Image: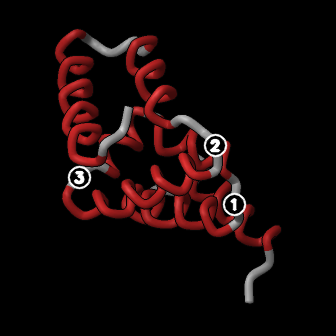
Amino acid sequence: MPTKKFRLALVQYFLSEDCKDKQRKYEEVPYLLEHEEQWQQLCTFITNVENFLALSERGHKFDLYRYWRSVTNASYSPDQVLIKTITESQMSTKEKMDTWSRAGSFFARNGAV
């Protein structure tokens, strides 16, 4: 059975530039962080705009919801973090509006905020 040190090393690999498999990153990183109860890191990962958009796609919606609830239950506020992240981002107006739209849909479906 993998140790905590090994799992966290995997997280670092999937977050590094060496990892070219983005799909695997979106599957492994949040799972490993949740498993190790690394709530702050998990909150940061799921509220990163690129990660949030990828996880809110069809294949990961239920996983995103579960991670969102896990982080919330651990006394973090991913909804507030995502709002701040989008607000302070350097995205174009169109990208920002698209992201707000996706976030609004996620919040509406999942009772966040």
Q: In this view of the protein, can residue 21 be seen by the observer?
A: no
Report x, y in % for residue 75: 63, 43
Quadrant assignment for the C terminus = top left
Residue 27 placed where, x, y %? 44, 65
Disc 2 is placed on an element classified as loop
Query: Quadrant of residue 51 in the image?
Result: top left
What whole-number distance in Å separates the C-alpha atoms at marks 2 and 3?
25 Å
| Residue linked to disc 1 | 37
Of 84 and 57, the residue lying toward us: 84
Of residues 106 and 58, the one drawn nearer to the viewer in this rendering: 106
Tell me if label 2 and label 3 are in contact, CB under 8 Å: no
Q: Looking at the image, which residue is at 17% across and 15% down? A: 94
Element under disc 1 = loop
Which quadrant does the N terminus fall into?
Answer: bottom right
Q: Can you tell which mark lies on residue 57?
A: 3
| Element under disc 3 | loop
Task: Count neighbours of disc 3 (C-alpha within 10 A) and say few if under 14, some if 14 to 19, many if 20 or more.
Answer: few
Q: Mark 1–mark 2 contact, CB under 8 Å?
A: no
For marks 3 and 1, give the one nearer the viewer.
1
Determine whether, in the image, residue 20 is placed left or right of residue 97.
right
* Residue type (three-letter) at the residue carrying disc 2: Ser
For label 1, the crowd category at 10 Å Cα-Cα, with few meaning under 14, some 14 to 19 and many 20 or more, is some
Q: What amino acid does circle 1 point to?
A: Glu
The residue mark sitting in front, 2 or 3, is 2
Identify which amino acid the numbered label 3 is placed on.
Glu
**Above or below, comparing residue 62 to residue 49 in the picture:** below
Q: Which mark is residue 75?
A: 2
